[in-house]
Image: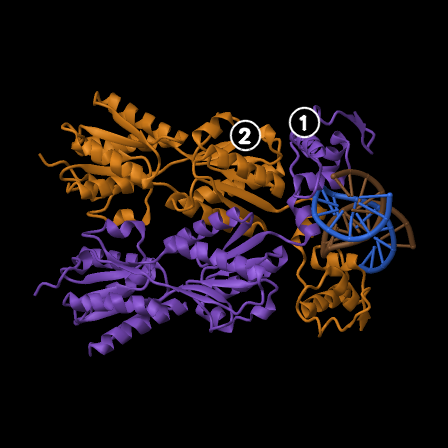
Chain colours: A purple, B orange, C brown, D blue
Amino acid sequence: MEADKRGVQRDLSKEWGLMGAKIKDVAALARVSIATVSRALGNGPVSADLKERVEQAAAQLGYRPNLSARRLRSQQSRTVGLLVSDIRNPFFTAVSRSVEDAAYRAGMRVILCNVDEDVKKEAMYLRLMQEERVCGVIFSPTGDTASHFRPDRFEFPVVMIDRAGPPGVTDAVVLDNMLAAQQLVTHLIERGYRRIGGLFGNSSTTGAERAAGYEAALMAQGLPVAARFVSPNVDAAVSAVKAWLAEPDHPDALIASNGLLLQGAVRALMEAGMSIPGDVALAGFDNDAWTGLVGQGLTVIEQPVYDIGTLAMEMLLSRLENPSLAKRKMVLNGVLLTRGSTATKQV
Amino acid sequence: MEADKRGVQRDLSKEWGLMGAKIKDVAALARVSIATVSRALGNGPVSADLKERVEQAAAQLGYRPNLSARRLRSQQSRTVGLLVSDIRNPFFTAVSRSVEDAAYRAGMRVILCNVDEDVKKEAMYLRLMQEERVCGVIFSPTGDTASHFRPDRFEFPVVMIDRAGPPGVTDAVVLDNMLAAQQLVTHLIERGYRRIGGLFGNSSTTGAERAAGYEAALMAQGLPVAARFVSPNVDAAVSAVKAWLAEPDHPDALIASNGLLLQGAVRALMEAGMSIPGDVALAGFDNDAWTGLVGQGLTVIEQPVYDIGTLAMEMLLSRLENPSLAKRKMVLNGVLLTRGSTATKQV
DNA sequence: CTGAAAGCGCTAACAG
DNA sequence: CTGTTAGCGCTTTCAG
């Protein structure tokens, strides 16, 4: 029996049961110092004998260390921040899942933030990351934030994903967007399409890079370029494509620079009563689950979504181990999945 | 100028710049006590004069409070845990987004955990929630955990979503699953289908409830019941449905008890070269983005996904304010979205 | 290997 | 309204 300072007699192992035990209580029950408890439960050097006793006491009390206290004292949060535009974008959903898996595997926790392609929210969440004293951040920034990003403003390393800022500013894991867009365009050309329109997101470097690849591929063949930029969301794509289709000389093929825009394009085509690829061929980015299911399937560039998160996390961990390393940019390749939406053009 | 205990002279406002400032540094620069800083930055009573000075000093130093310290001292984490089976299930993606929105609005943070319908992971993450000293948890448990759940084992309240345990054990926000399944079946019957198969998840109470509704609706009409239970993932659904379709007297209509199973059913039907609804009609749960895009659209029960998260968070906050309130279960209704996949049966 | 003691950075009494 | 003081629960020197 113990009498704590409130003078309440309590049998730690029974009456208090499983809740609210602190290291001190464990120490008392195991008849050791709190330092020994800390070491026994952590990785300190403790004799097997005492370790046993401590573990038993801890189990008996249902002791759970207070992570805030631990983090404060040890000065390390074992936490990473993950800032994405919107978790509902399947690309980010998949990435975030793999980041979480990798993080928990490394004994870290992740704080997920939806920044909605909004510079203000980005700044706010970045501030929050400071307050959390995260050890690092995995970040998919808007074009604006990416281009002005000052890593020296933060005391944690940043790994950018999907989008990268100026070279050498932060680590990054990105797709070879130019190449991927070129592949898509080349494929459409091979299939007989000539008036190929491109729909791109207007807020990220990714959209811009894919547009560049699109243009390059068309110009190399002397074909006309028709790129349009919209907010990266379904509704914006729907109205843009609808308007486009209403024009007299509209494209006979369309590429969409991400899964959301692709979805919008499909919807617009359906609502306009046009067939794919009969009236307009369609291809895009992101092998989202549904793309294989609509019509004869949609031709897409598949990104290694799960790997992107895993690699970003690895990059972050290696940066943490070796802060002075030169900044690295890892460029991945997408793979072209050919499906019915880009069947050879019928004349 | 200040000389800190390390004897290093430093001009706080310039040389140290924006990093690593602590409350003590702000106090020194503003020439007030640390308590005043704390109050000025929090909501304590401080004269406008000093408040101004403190804020300026804080801004100059780029001071950011250390949340671990704050949480330790104030004994409140302002954090909620969110345990879902897999964030990649669009239902949980949407719910989690709304939980996060609501949480940040309430000045709270959320820790997201993917438990993969795995009892071990559930236990592990629940333990982690204890260590984080979260103020509450929003939880979508496996049937197993739900039925044995002992809220007294945890020092935080739990709100279950999508699935509920025994009545009165925890708060919960759920769909009226029986009713929704009945609506689906009734609709199919009205459209002329008679051999209606049901595909349900085998690990949650939700699947069971929907199966019950399905059975009730069929039995009320004296129609045959054919329910099959599978792991709640796409691949399991694909093979189950494929096998089913290969049987001589297979159903002429199918309902799938969630978005993942529905997706699997579509894929199986496509791969078997069967048309929807010509060969087999199809309906299911969850108005995932793609369901409007395949074929003539898929008939589904739409759940108020965003609301579910918002309401769960509200319920949690109200529970926090009033712990002694009786346990509440909020039952929401889905809405039937009729689309081409359940067009009237052609004979 | 073990214990005593000193804080991590902050908030909340308690005095003035 | 403001400053002083005492910890929150834990890890980590520093002695023994």
Q: Label 1 amino acid?
A: Gly
Residue depicted at 74% across the width and 31% down the height:
A30
Of residue D7 and residue B99, the one placed in the foreground of this image is: D7
Please, what secondary structure does the residue beneath circle 1 have? loop
Please indicate, yes or no, whether residue B167 appears anywhere in the rendered image: no
Of residue A131 and residue A136, the one placed in the foreground of this image is: A136
Residue depicted at 48% across the width and 45% down the height:
B310
Q: Looking at the image, how many numbered discs can be counted on the residues?
A: 2
Residue D9, x across and y down, in percent: 71, 41
* Tag 2 residue: B327
Of residue B62 and residue A13, the one placed in the foreground of this image is: A13
- CB of mark 2 within 8 Å of CB of mark 1? no
Figure check: B299 above or below B105: above
Which of the 4 image quadrants contains residue A16? Answer: top right
* Tag 1 residue: A17
Circle 1 chain: A
Please, what secondary structure does the residue beneath circle 2 have? loop
Q: Label 2 amino acid?
A: Lys
In this rendering, would B201 be left or right of B96?
Answer: left
